[in-house]
């Protein structure tokens, strides 16, 4: 196990250092002054009352903090109406006249989002306690890796596929060990996740290129390309596909490892083949549900686009061939293939790690329970306190999840 894991971890650390870009990657053309404020009054624009409103805003953050300014807000059925008491985001055109310097950009949603995040954190901790705290820390680490490594590395011109695999591996190492602890159980799940992750990345590369996907149909892709011409949009799609599949791969790998561990504890004499077969049977049911979840998640994200095609009366075969739909199909199916692969890979690794217990050792353990001893003989001949008689050696006793 360590012979596989340690080189992978070492290579990941080296690539994290080599691929991490230096310097500031911000584009000057996109930098602009911003502010936040509270609306104290709203009146129609004098010259165009049907087209816009003039909002009086007390600036609470950003340019002009502490001052009272006026901001122009466009009236449109699809634009949220600005009303007194609302918290809003402002754009600042510093070269403009004072009356036109501030523009309404959007609603300030910081408070409801913070409330939702707090509710989520409380729910996770209430159910999982210290493991929930660890999971939240792992979530924060994931955000740091994405924003401080994956995005800057791709923007600097590094291969998006390599960056996604390295970043995804780093996320899984930190998230799994933080959440589930450092153990052979977690290490098996980690190796299974990495194996399925690499397969997902390769399949994504092959089929996105085979389908001749340009990447321009993705949201924001053309804007990114206009400001950063060197970015590989097709590679960016692959990176998004890999990162999007990570969470589900993690779930499948952890579940399969736990299943094999429990099967081994229930039947210590089971051979590796028996453990693999039994674990695979459980995995089939899990995969059926998880694959459906992944496909529905992608379909839900693309629902407005699918509605547009539906009302246009375009034939289904034509719709499927358009890039905007083909991208979602590739994402869903490649992600599903990664999940399917994670089950046999992780199950095989877990079964390979667990040593079958000879029948005579189990019989000896039963005699100990009947009063002939005080513990279970470990692999070195010593008694391991706290290990159950059904454990395969000391494996289950070492598992923090039991």
Image (spheres, rainbow, N blue to C red):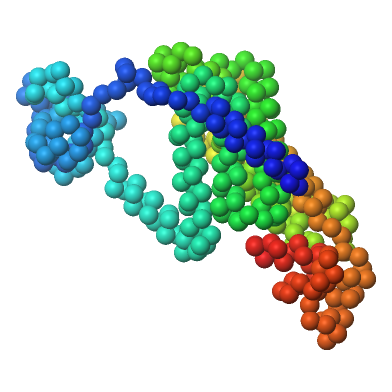
Quadrant (top left/top right/bottom left/bottom right) for the C terminus:
bottom right
Q: Count the marks: how many?
A: 0
Quarter assignment of residue 343: top right
Q: In this view, does 216 lie above or below 239?
A: above
Residue extending farthest to the right is 360
Whether residue 83 is visible:
no
User: What x and y, as percent, mark residue 122?
Assistant: 42, 59
The residue lying toward the viewer, choosing from 43 and 370, is 370
Is residue 365 found left or right of 39 in the rendered image? right
Q: In this view, does 210 lie above or below 179?
A: above
Quarter assignment of residue 323: top right
The residue lying toward the viewer, choosing from 154 and 114, is 154
Q: In this view, does 265 lie above or below 204?
A: below
User: What x and y, as percent, mark residue 209?
Assistant: 64, 18
- Residue at image location 77% in from the left, 51% down from the top: 350
The residue lying toward the viewer, choosing from 3 and 312, is 3
User: What x and y, as percent, mark residue 56?
Assistant: 10, 35
Residue extending farthest to the bottom is 371
The residue lying toward the viewer, choosing from 169 and 252, is 169
Is residue 151 found left or right of 161 in the rendered image? left
Whether residue 246 is visible:
yes
- Residue at image location 46% in from the left, 40% down from the top: 144
- Residue at image location 74% in from the left, 41% down from the top: 4
- Residue at image location 26% in from the left, 40% down from the top: 108
Q: In this view, does 75 lie above or below 386?
A: above
Is residue 196 found left or right of 281 in the rendered image? left
User: What x and y, as percent, mark residue 47?
Assistant: 8, 20
């Amino acid at each position: 196990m360590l012979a596989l894991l340690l080189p992978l971890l070492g290579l990941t650390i080296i690539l994290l250092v080599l691929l991490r870009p230096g310097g500031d990657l911000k584009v000057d053309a996109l930098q602009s002054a911003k502010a936040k404020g509270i609306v104290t009054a709203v009146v129609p624009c004098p010259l165009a009352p049907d087209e816009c409103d003039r909002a009086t805003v007390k600036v609470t953050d950003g340019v002009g903090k502490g001052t009272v300014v006026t901001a122009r807000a466009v009236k449109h059925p699809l634009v949220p109406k600005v009303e007194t008491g609302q918290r809003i985001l402002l754009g600042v055109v510093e070269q403009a006249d004072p009356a036109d310097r501030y523009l309404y950009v959007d609603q300030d949603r910081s408070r409801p989002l913070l409330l939702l995040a707090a509710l989520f954190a409380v729910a996770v901790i209430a159910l999982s306690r210290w493991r929930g705290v660890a999971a939240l820390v792992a979530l924060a680490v994931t955000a740091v890796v994405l924003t401080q490594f994956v995005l800057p590395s791709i923007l600097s011109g590094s291969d998006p596929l390599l960056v996604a695999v390295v970043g995804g591996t780093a996320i899984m190492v930190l998230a799994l060990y933080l959440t589930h602890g450092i153990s052979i159980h977690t290490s098996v799940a980690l190796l299974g996740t990495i194996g399925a992750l690499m397969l997902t990345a390769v399949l994504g590369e092959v089929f996105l290129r085979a389908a001749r996907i340009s990447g321009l149909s993705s949201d924001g892709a053309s804007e990114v390309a206009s400001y950063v011409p060197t970015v590989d949009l097709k590679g960016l799609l692959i990176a998004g596909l890999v990162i999007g599949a990570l969470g589900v791969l993690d779930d499948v790998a952890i579940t399969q490892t736990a299943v094999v561990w429990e099967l081994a504890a229930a039947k210590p004499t089971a051979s590796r083949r028996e453990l693999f077969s039994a674990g695979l049977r459980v995995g089939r049911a899990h995969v059926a549900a998880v694959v459906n979840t992944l496909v529905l998640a992608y379909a839900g994200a693309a629902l407005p686009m699918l509605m547009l095609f539906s009302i246009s009366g375009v034939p289904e075969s034509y719709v499927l061939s358009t890039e905007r739909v083909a991208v979602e199909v590739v994402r869903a199916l490649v992600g599903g293939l990664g999940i399917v692969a994670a089950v046999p890979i992780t199950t095989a690794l877990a079964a390979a790690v667990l040593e079958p217990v000879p029948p005579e050792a189990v019989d000896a353990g039963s005699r100990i329970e009947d009063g002939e001893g005080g513990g279970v003989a470990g692999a070195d001949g010593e008694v391991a306190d706290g290990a159950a008689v059904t454990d395969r050696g000391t494996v289950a006793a070492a598992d923090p999840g039991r």
